[in-house]
Image (cartoon, helix red, strand yellow):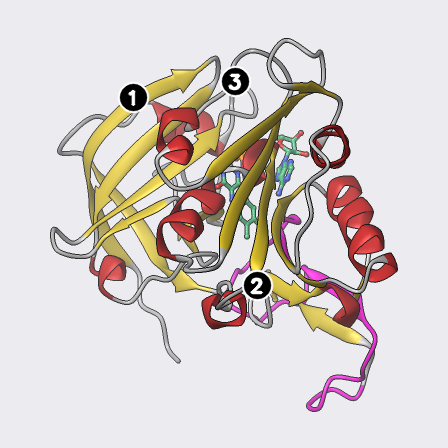
Amino acid sequence: MDMKKENAVVVSQEMLADGIFSMWIQTDAAQTAKPGQFISMYTKDGSKLLPRPISICEINKADGQLRVVYRVTGENTGTKQFSELKEGDEIPVIGPLGNGFPLEKAEGKKAFLMGGGIGVPPILELSKQLSCECKQIVVGYRDAHTFLKEEFEQNGSLYISTEDGSVGTKGNVMDAIRANALEAEIIYACGPTPMLRAIKQYAEENNIVCYISMEERMACGIGACLACVCQSKEKDHHSNVHNKRICKDGPVFLSTEVEI
Ligand code: FAD
Ligand code: FES
């Protein structure tokens, strides 16, 4: 499908925690967006030609708005520029991009919805839309600067881990599962690669269906440049190689499909 760039309009912007911002934008992408998809956001600065991929955190279809929650990565960065946008400012975006989480697989099952770091935001819309037997949200943060906690509490049973132990279980999301003796039949997860690797291994050892969303670095974001490929078990039908493009074939994959 051909995606065209659109000038979205900033509806609101606020800081949720140290360096973590939440922005609602008015965009046509809200009409078709699904949990687990992302949008590519452009800066106005000509030195940064490539857009920045940011997950969709919440969808308000009725008002045509999307929410993104993002971490500012440094002083002279694209995310720093996004954080300076004010209500009414325009921001060029493309989206929704990627495949999203398969919601129907959780029907009647006990599920883990797991997020770590900047992989936490997409878990919110997932937790709102997923219908399952038992919704256990397990999210991991660095420290007491947690975000989206109240929203998660309204959408499932919430378990938190922090690296420094200041809130919830000390350690990572896997430590929170063990500390609370939680069990699941299906897992949805998004976060940094080491976290996804641990979840993939746990799921495969325990025969649990597991979908992971990968937030690797990207360039074009639309499947054209191959900057984002990861190794796959099966050969790709088109290129006949063991590769998958995270931006186009993902970012969500069945854990058994990809090598990480
Ligand atoms: P750059 O100037 O490009 O880099 C600054 C620093 O950030 C460098 O140290 C660089 O190594 C690091 N960095 C750049 N890209 C990444 C990355 N992908 N992962 C980790 N570190 C990175 N971020 C959010 O805060 N919220 C989200 O919801 C979110 N969703 C994403 C969804 C997808 C599918 C992908 C691929 C990435 C997502 N990211 C998200 C990461 C986000 O795209 C990067 O943080 C952003 O592109 C950095 O751009 P920048 O101009 O601020 O930093
Ligand atoms: Fe270009 Fe994925 S970022 S193909």
Three-letter residue code for mark 3: Glu
The residues bearing labels 3 and 2 have C-alpha atoms spaced at a distance of: 26 Å
Three-letter residue code for mark 2: Cys
* Quadrant where the image shows the N terminus: bottom left
In the image, 175 versus 120, the foreground residue is: 175
Closer to the eye: label 3 or 1? 1
Q: Name the mark on residue 212.
A: none
Please provide percent x and percent y for residue 14. Answer: 29, 21
Q: In the rendered image, which residue does mark 2 sit on?
A: 247
Report whether the residue tagged 2 is closer than 8 Å to ligand 2.
Answer: yes
Q: Name the mark on residue 14.
A: 1
For label 1, the crowd category at 10 Å Cα-Cα, with few meaning under 14, some 14 to 19 and many 20 or more, is few
Instruction: Find the magenta span and give its range.
Output: 212-240
Please provide percent x and percent y for residue 102. Answer: 51, 69
Indicate which disc, 3 or 2, sits on the residue closer to the N terminus: 3
- Horizontal side of 167 relative to 198 (left or right) equals left
Q: Which residue is drawn at 48% across and 12% down?
A: 18
